[in-house]
Image: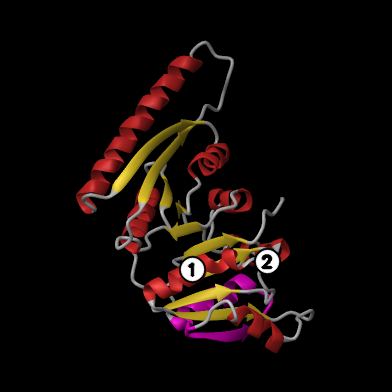
Amino acid sequence: MKYVLLLTDFSDIARNAIIYALNMLKNEHLYYKLVNTYDLEFSGSPYVMQVKDELAEESIKGLNNELQLIHRLFPGVRVELASRFGSLIEVIQEEVKDYNPDLIVLGNKGESAIEHFLLGSNAYEIIKRINKPLLVVPKGAHFIKPEKIVFATDLNDFKSDDVIRPVRDIVMYFNAQLLFIHVLEESDKDRFEAENKILSHFPDIKSAFYYLQGDNVAKRICDFVDEQGAGMVIMIRHNKSFFERIIYTSTTKQMILHPKHTLVVLHDEVCED
């Protein structure tokens, strides 16, 4: 890993995610790019250019304030600032094209409705449309070195070993135990064969498979993470139906605790939505 993109809207939630990531990666020699986007919700007004200039000025001011805080907490960290005009998704897509980050970090406001699992709407839109590894940090989360990392799997093998290299890197970096979990379905294939294929990508890593039952997939995963005391959840979005079964598991009004688990999302391929 070399380049990390940090997204900010100058909120406490975004700032917390940045601090989380810098603590998590503090022993790595990385280049960071701190990005803020601003946009106009209206057009055709004679004051558009004036408003745009004012927004640009506020954006640059905010970025410099964030940089001062970062340097107070993490002296010497290398951070480039980027103030960008446009929609969040379009700006991120351009940054990915030009900067090619190894990781994108974003905060999550922490929706408590079960149909949002660990994600707010902005985070989910980024996951759907940005084909890069993502670190999604819930509101109020503080980095603690994880002893256990949960990997939610659909038991399918990966299209490329490169896809899961970040998983190995993370697990080995923290010397953590990797816990694979799968919520059982009627269409499940031979589990023994599937386990062997998946484990072949993780030699010399302490791991175990767990199988859960229940229709409320998101809640079962959250409960499992709590029971195990795991510090992080990893998912690979290579099967859109499985991924959305977790993120939008139902339209029920049932509520769960405010999410508190950090989520790493990887992409096996670009999923069209």
- Looking at the picture, tell me which residue is in the foreground, 45 or 163: 163
Who's the residue at 54% across and 58% down the image?
A: 119
The N terminus, quarter of image? bottom left
Answer whether residue 220 is magenta in the image. Answer: yes
Q: 58 above or below 153?
A: above
Q: First in sequence: mark 1 or mark 2? A: 2
Residue 215: quadrant of the picture: bottom right
Question: Residue reaching furthest right?
Answer: 187
Left/right of residue 139 with respect to residue 127 in the rendered view = left
Residue 22: quadrant of the picture: bottom left
- Where residue 176 sits in the image (x, y, percent)? 41, 78
Left/right of residue 122 with respect to residue 251 in the rendered view = left
Answer whether residue 132 is magenta in the image. Answer: no
Binning the other alpha carbons within 10 Å of mark 1 as few (below 14), some (14 to 19) or many (20 upward) gives: few
Q: Which residue is mark 1?
A: 257
Q: Which residue is mark 2?
A: 159
Query: Three-letter amino acid code at disc 1?
Result: Leu
| Foreground tag (1 vs 2) | 2
The residue stretch that appears in magenta: 204-228
Query: Three-letter amino acid code at disc 2?
Result: Lys
